[in-house]
Image (cartoon, rainbow, N blue to C red):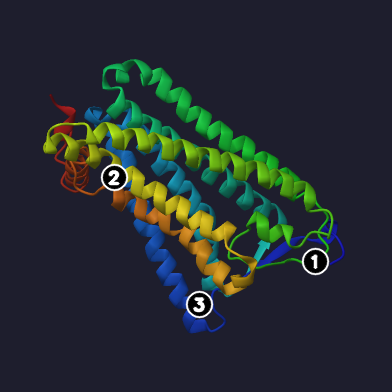
């Protein structure tokens, strides 16, 4: 294919060539996807229904679960369908939409994790000002800023990438439409414009990372000054789930995009993409369900929602009553 105007579809990279391995991939991804749907769906339902969890920390957690559901639903269902029907085709508009949604949701998640670090910083380092700095209006504005920033970032990347002439065929070396892989199909000099945009995004991501590191530096200093061991444990327990989610998100993304080209191969890129696009949305609900002081309410509320859903007697669940 000589240029992008003649491309009507892209060919995604398959996980396996044999039918048995394709079906194995189908069942594995289906299980991961259903687990992610269940875990994130329960968190969203619980926080939305239980007024005791209508606090900034859980409000941001609800937004995180929505973003995780969106990101895994952008890539995995298409990959499952391709394995089931033994095809790798995706239309040009569907590919552009998939790339846009993935950049949008993952960028918004990066900004939201930064906001959540600020929430933990204020809660531990400035507890007397928590209600003032993180009131309901401020929380909505910060969440909206994360979503809006992700949307603008995605529009910029998608518009730049899919306006480039594509001269290297239509085979994408990934199981979804990933912008770096699309850029490999562009003409030799045309990709430089998008590279500039990518550099800006990397700088923004690095800025978020620095902010999170500095926030946790202040948090750890404040926690170590707490005289009682029980108080230190309580403070640490509210931070560990977020810190684990941030570490998982950042480490997989860094390895995916900053690894040396000398160790890169299509199959390795495929596995790395699973680590940063599929694993975090499935594991985040499990991480946030770890038993600590702040998450105990969420675990109890989850059990109440499940009990109400399966054994409803026509009454409201317990946490609706005072």
Q: Secondary structure at mark 1?
A: loop
Q: Which dot marks residue 246? A: none
Corner quadrant of residue 29? bottom left
Corner quadrant of residue 27? bottom left
Mark 3 closeness class: few <14, some 14–19, many ≥20 residues within 10 Å: many
Q: Which dot marks residue 168? A: 1
Position of 93 compared to 283: left or right?
right
Q: Nearer the viewer, residue 184 or 319?
A: 184
Q: Which dot marks residue 22? A: 3
Q: CA distance from mark 1 to mark 2?
A: 45 Å
Q: CA distance from mark 2 to mark 3?
A: 37 Å
Q: Which is nearer the N-term, disc 1 or disc 2?
A: 1
Residue 233 position in % (x across, y down): 17, 40
Q: Nearer the viewer, mark 1 or mark 3?
A: 1
Give the residue drawn at x 67%, y 47%.
198
Position of 255 compared to 300: left or right?
right
The correct choice, above or below, for 103 with respect to 283 in the image is above
Asked if one can make out residue 54 in the rendered structure from this viewpoint, the answer is no
Residue 265 position in % (x across, y down): 61, 73
Mark 2 closeness class: few <14, some 14–19, many ≥20 residues within 10 Å: some
Give the residue drawn at x 51%, y 33%.
146
Label 2 close to label 3 by CB (< 8 Å): no
Give the residue pinned by disc 2: 240
Give the residue drawn at x 44%, y 47%.
68
Q: Which quadrant of the rendered structure holds the N terminus?
A: bottom right
Q: Which is nearer the N-term, disc 2 or disc 3?
A: 3
Position of 172 compared to 148: left or right?
right
């Amino acid at each position: 294919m000589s240029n992008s105007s003649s491309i009507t579809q892209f060919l995604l990279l398959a996980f396996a060539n044999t039918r048995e391995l394709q079906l194995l991939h189908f069942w594995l991804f289906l299980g991961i996807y259903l687990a992610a749907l269940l875990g994130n769906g329960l968190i969203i339902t619980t926080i939305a229904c239980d007024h005791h969890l209508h606090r900034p920390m859980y409000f941001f957690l609800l937004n995180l679960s929505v973003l995780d559901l969106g990101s895994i639903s952008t890539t995995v269902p298409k990959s499952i369908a391709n394995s089931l029907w033994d095809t790798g085709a995706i239309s040009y508009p569907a590919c552009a939409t998939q790339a846009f949604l993935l950049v949008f949701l993952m960028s918004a998640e990066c900004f939201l994790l930064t906001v959540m670090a600020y929430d933990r910083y204020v809660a531990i380092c400035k507890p007397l000002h928590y209600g003032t700095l993180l009131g309901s209006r401020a929380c909505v504005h910060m969440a909206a800023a994360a979503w809006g920033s992700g949307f603008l970032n995605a529009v910029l990347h998608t518009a730049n990438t899919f306006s480039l002439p594509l001269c290297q065929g239509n085979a994408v070396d990934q199981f979804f439409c990933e912008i770096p892989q699309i850029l490999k199909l562009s003409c030799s000099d045309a990709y430089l414009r998008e590279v500039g945009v990518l550099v800006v995004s990397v700088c923004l991501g690095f800025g978020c990372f620095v902010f999170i590191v500095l926030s946790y530096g202040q948090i750890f200093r404040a926690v170590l000054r707490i005289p009682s061991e029980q108080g230190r444990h309580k403070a640490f327990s509210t931070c560990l789930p977020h810190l684990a989610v941030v570490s998982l998100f950042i480490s997989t993304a860094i390895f995916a995009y900053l690894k040396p080209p000398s160790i890169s191969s299509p199959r390795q890129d495929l596995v790395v993409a699973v680590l940063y696009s599929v694993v975090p949305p499935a594991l985040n609900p499990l991480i946030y369900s770890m038993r600590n002081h702040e998450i105990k309410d969420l675990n109890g509320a989850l059990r109440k929602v499940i009990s109400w859903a399966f054994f409803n007697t026509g009454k409201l669940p317990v946490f609706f009553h005072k």
